[in-house]
């Protein structure tokens, strides 16, 4: 909005395509002390964001969780996994453009505010004048016999608002379609295979553990917590990570043991996870799961990720960190 403070003479406005009656009108306008439509815009925009993140997003997350769990139970899957968020992010852009459209439509019917926005539009476009220049020509050609300043400025701003309205509609449609797809996009893990339904691809991916050739395993520690690594790679270069999957019943260790047995039968090799300078078996991660799972379950967990024994030197190393 700062560019609207630049002073343009009547002749400068006329030279860029503004009708002289409109240029005279603009030069005689005093800017409002408070640009209340702008204030309202930010209030409406921020309120919409808050509602989306605190109300709409959680409802959608609960729905996809229910869909994934229901599909897992009905199909006899051991575990399930889903990731959600692309649709709502697209919806965020829809709301940005919709807010801009609402703002401009309101401003168009408030003469003093409309004059400020008009000057802002033409001033900010002086360097690359195509957008504003095109709208000026369109408005002038539509009502060449009616150069009344307030009506001319209103038509210009409405024309500007229409661009945002079209963008808002396009993004809203995309958000609706993607969100509908996402609500049924999840991965189901069985004792012999996994099936992944994608958000953007029409067909699901089905791969059998018998076709796996290697599994990356480890225990990763970050500031956000500790996570096991269990990523299965297949002969066709595809892969899937089971470490983030949720068990339908029993617990993660029990269900992954069934998949692990199938991978062992397939002759797949297990190798320590590797990424940048991370340790494949961080002592802090192993200690965290040792405390969380208890001795028996932890020993089974350690076997799944092929971790070394949690000896004294590992405990000491973890405590020092």
Image (cartoon, rainbow, N blue to C red):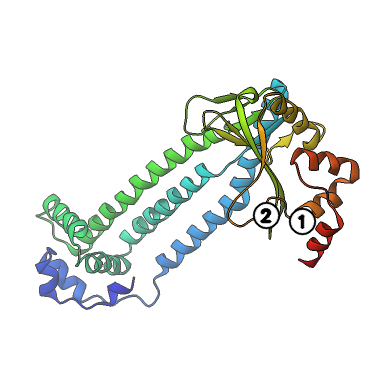
Q: Residue furthest right?
A: 295
Dividing the picture into quadrants, the one containing residue 127 is: bottom left
Residue 300 falls left or right of residue 60? right
Crowd band around label 2 with a 10 angstrom C-alpha radius: few (<14), some (14–19), many (20+): some
| Residue at mark 1 | 283
Measuring from the top left, give residue 26's x and y in whole percent. Answer: 20, 72
Measuring from the top left, give residue 169's x and y in whole percent. Answer: 39, 43
Above-or-below relation of 10 to 66? below
Q: Are marks 1 and 2 in contact (CB under 8 Å)?
A: yes
Residue drawn at point x = 79 percent, y = 37 percent: 253
Residue 116 falls left or right of residue 60? left
Above-or-below relation of 216 to 155? above
Above-or-below relation of 208 to 172? above
Q: Nearer the viewer, residue 280 or 126?
A: 280
Residue 257 falls left or right of residue 170? right
Looking at the rendering, in which quadrant would you find the N terminus?
Answer: bottom left
Residue drawn at point x = 52 percent, y = 45 percent: 88
Q: Is residue 109 visible?
A: no
Measuring from the top left, give residue 28's x and y in whole percent. Answer: 20, 77
How far, Cα to Cα, is label 1 from label 2?
A: 9 Å
| Residue at mark 2 | 279
Q: Is residue 35 visible?
A: yes
Residue 314 falls left or right of residue 137? right
Dot 2: element: loop
Residue drawn at point x = 54 percent, y = 58 percent: 47
Residue drawn at point x = 31 percent, y = 76 percent: 31
């Amino acid at each position: 909005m700062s560019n609207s403070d630049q002073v343009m003479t009547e002749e400068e406005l006329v030279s860029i395509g503004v009708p002289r009656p409109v240029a005279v009108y603009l030069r005689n306008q005093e800017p409002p002390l408070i640009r209340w439509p702008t204030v309202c815009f930010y209030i409406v925009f921020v309120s919409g964001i808050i509602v989306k993140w605190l109300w709409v997003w959680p409802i959608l997350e609960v729905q996809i969780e229910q869909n994934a769990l229901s599909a897992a139970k009905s199909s006899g899957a051991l575990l399930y996994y889903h990731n959600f968020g692309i649709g709502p992010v697209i919806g965020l852009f829809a709301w940005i453009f919709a807010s801009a459209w609402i703002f401009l439509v309101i401003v168009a019917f408030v003469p003093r505010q409309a004059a400020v926005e008009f000057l802002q539009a033409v001033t900010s476009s002086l360097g690359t004048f195509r957008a504003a220049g095109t709208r000026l020509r369109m408005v002038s050609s539509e009502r060449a016999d009616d150069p009344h300043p307030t009506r001319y400025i209103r038509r210009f701003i409405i024309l500007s608002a229409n661009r945002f309205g079209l963008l808002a509609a396009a993004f809203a449609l995309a958000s609706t379609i993607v969100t509908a797809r996402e609500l049924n996009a999840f991965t189901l893990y069985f004792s012999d295979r996994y099936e992944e339904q994608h958000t953007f691809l029409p067909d699901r991916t089905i791969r059998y553990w018998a076709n796996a050739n290697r599994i990356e395993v480890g225990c990763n520690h970050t500031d956000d917590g500790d996570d096991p690594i269990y990523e299965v790679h297949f002969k066709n270069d595809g892969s899937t990570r089971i470490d983030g999957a949720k068990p339908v019943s029993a617990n993660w260790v029990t269900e992954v043991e069934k998949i692990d047995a199938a991978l062992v039968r397939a002759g797949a090799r297990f190798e320590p996870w590797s990424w940048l300078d991370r340790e494949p078996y961080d002592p802090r991660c192993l200690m965290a799961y040792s405390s969380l799972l208890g001795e028996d379950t932890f020993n089974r967990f350690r076997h799944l990720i092929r971790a070394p024994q949690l000896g004294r030197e590992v405990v000491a190393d973890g405590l020092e960190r």
